[in-house]
Image (spheres, coloured by chain):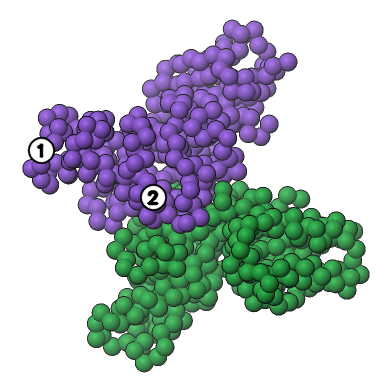
Chain colours: A purple, B green
């Protein structure tokens, strides 16, 4: 008899849910709003109700469901304890796995950090398929990461594994990162970081650029790069120099088979790799020189795939 | 009935061997020379003969021995394949585990890189006891590393996991590292790196220093630091700035509970931490701020302990 897994990706506005068979084929996908009021205490009950309804709607029994995996925007340690998730209103530490388990009697529950869980999704059904050692790099508003070693997520001793957006990469930075430090990778390689680099480049010269006539975004920078705009190309070179150097260091630590690049910035496509590779190859240890670069392929669904895969990790 | 494990640490000159019970108590320790002639083809047969003799000397049978673990100075992947070990004369890839297994019929064999294996030893019976997420940092002629996540070694996809001596840490370096790159952590944090920093500091000024009257070594630098020598203290500050920054990056990637610092330089003692901590704390992601620092305690025996523990990892 077929068995199913449920993956839940909790965002600050919307909870995405998906039901999959054990091969990762989608049975159904749906969304519910994230109710963050009252310290976010409604979020898990809302999810449990929605999961139960979906099971009934498919005429499945609880026994048909191998378990429910859930990814949340905050650090989650190996025991399934969330260490705050400010975007959800959760301001204390609690066991996500126990709390969700009580709401879904008879169903095993697994939990993880959303970026880490998305990495697992990309390994299962996305850009990292077939690999068991990979690093997912999410270039969005910030820079997130998820590290998988021997097929398993590196959550870290306090749930801060894979926080690669905050590795120190520049000694001479005067603007603080959102984390409070100065010179984090995120300050140059995120969508906002690319805008920062572009604004600095625009201010540093009077050189003509199509970027002077429009709102500067990561997208407009890479569109200009593709159109051959010299100033935009200099911005892309700086972005690539920082990111390539950062990924080379990460390769020196965990020696993955592949970096899977996702997030909004990755919509620019493989042109990104042209700018990342030179500094990567210049600074990486020779044993990691052949690490591949691939684009993430699951987009916003990576989280539900990965959350579902969490359940199957120990099965 | 008691069971035993054998740990083998293959160096360029000497092979260290140890027999342990499953609790890690030493039954016997001994050494044999490493015969590197003829492409190192005698090394494994020599080890097998020596292990068999030791088993007989204790009146044990092959069944009393749970297995033999072996650490070698070269990259070893998760399948037990060595990718060259130039110090041993091994210049092609082969399965260390299969080759050793043929020489020791009936005994399971495990293999790993020597620095990684030593890290496992420190976790089992040394400075990292009780931890399951740790990074061992060996400050010797070079800088080596061993990363343990959830109690297991991170060998990496090509055996280059934990090669932390070659993470890029300085953009403005004109002297090449032994690996061919410029600005590797090893160029500043190894024993030879400390001498490099000291010689640069001595050349940069005429300031008095006890280091001007003696051979400059890592030991003489830290002896001078303890005696309050201002120039030596500047050298220690530079060393600590590089190493603290490097370890902060590593913490951002894998978020360990503890860094266990070993190798010849670590004989200076906990004074090292006074120089590492300021830049570590300045640049590390807040989620890893409480990572502990500890000294390695097993010295040259870490390799045999760790090799023996390799056998027990899957038991």
Earlier sequence position, callout 2 versus callout 1: 1
Percent x, y for residue B186?
Answer: 44, 67
The N terminus of chain A appears in which quarter of the rendering?
Answer: top right
Alpha carbon separation for disc pair 2 and 1 = 30 Å
- Which residue is painted at 17% across and 29% down in the image? A215
Name of the residue lying farthest toward the left: A206
Residue B221 higher or lower than A64, as above or below: below
Task: Report whether residue A217 is seen.
Answer: no
SS class, disc 2: helix
Given the image, what chain letter belongs to the residue carrying mark 2? A
* Residue wearing tag 2: A280
Name of the residue lying farthest toward the front: B38
Given the image, what chain letter belongs to the residue carrying mark 1? A
* Label 1 crowd bin: few (<14), some (14–19), many (20+), radius 10 Å: few
Percent x, y for residue B15?
Answer: 69, 73
SS class, disc 1: loop
- Which residue is painted at 46% across and 51% down in the image? A289
The C terminus of chain A appears in which quarter of the rendering?
Answer: top right
Please indicate whether residue A273 sits to the left or right of residue B3 in the image. left
């Amino acid at each position: 008899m077929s068995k199913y897994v449920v993956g839940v990706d909790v965002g600050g506005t919307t909870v995405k849910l998906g039901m999959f068979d054990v091969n990762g084929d989608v049975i159904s996908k749906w969304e519910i709003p994230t109710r963050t009021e009252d310290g976010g205490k409604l979020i898990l009950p809302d999810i449990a109700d929605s999961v139960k309804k979906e099971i009934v709607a498919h005429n499945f029994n609880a026994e048909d469901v191998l378990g429910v995996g859930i990814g949340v925007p905050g650090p989650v340690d190996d025991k399934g304890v969330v260490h705050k998730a400010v975007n959800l209103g959760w301001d204390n530490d609690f066991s996500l796995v126990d709390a969700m388990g009580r709401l879904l009697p008879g169903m095993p529950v697994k939990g993880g950090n959303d970026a880490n869980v998305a990495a697992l999704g990309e390994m299962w059904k996305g850009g990292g398929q077939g690999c068991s050692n990979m690093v997912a790099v999410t270039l969005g508003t910030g820079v997130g990461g998820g590290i998988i070693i021997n097929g398993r997520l590196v959550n870290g001793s306090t749930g801060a594994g894979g926080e690669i957006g905050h590795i120190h990469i520049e000694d001479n930075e005067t603007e603080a990162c959102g984390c409070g430090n100065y010179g984090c990778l995120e300050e140059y390689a995120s969508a906002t970081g690319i805008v920062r680099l572009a604004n600095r480049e625009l201010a540093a010269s009077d050189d003509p650029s199509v970027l002077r006539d429009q709102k500067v975004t990561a997208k407009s920078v890479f569109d200009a790069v593709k159109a051959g705009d010299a100033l935009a190309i200099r911005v892309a070179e700086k972005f690539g120099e920082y990111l390539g150097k950062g990924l080379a260091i990460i390769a020196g630590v965990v020696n993955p088979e592949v970096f899977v690049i996702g997030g909004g910035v990755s919509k620019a496509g493989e042109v990104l790799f042209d700018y990342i590779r030179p500094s990567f190859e210049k600074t990486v240890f020779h044993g990691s020189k052949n690490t591949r670069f691939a684009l993430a392929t699951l987009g916003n669904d990576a989280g539900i795939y990965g959350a579902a895969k969490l359940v199957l990790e120990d099965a």
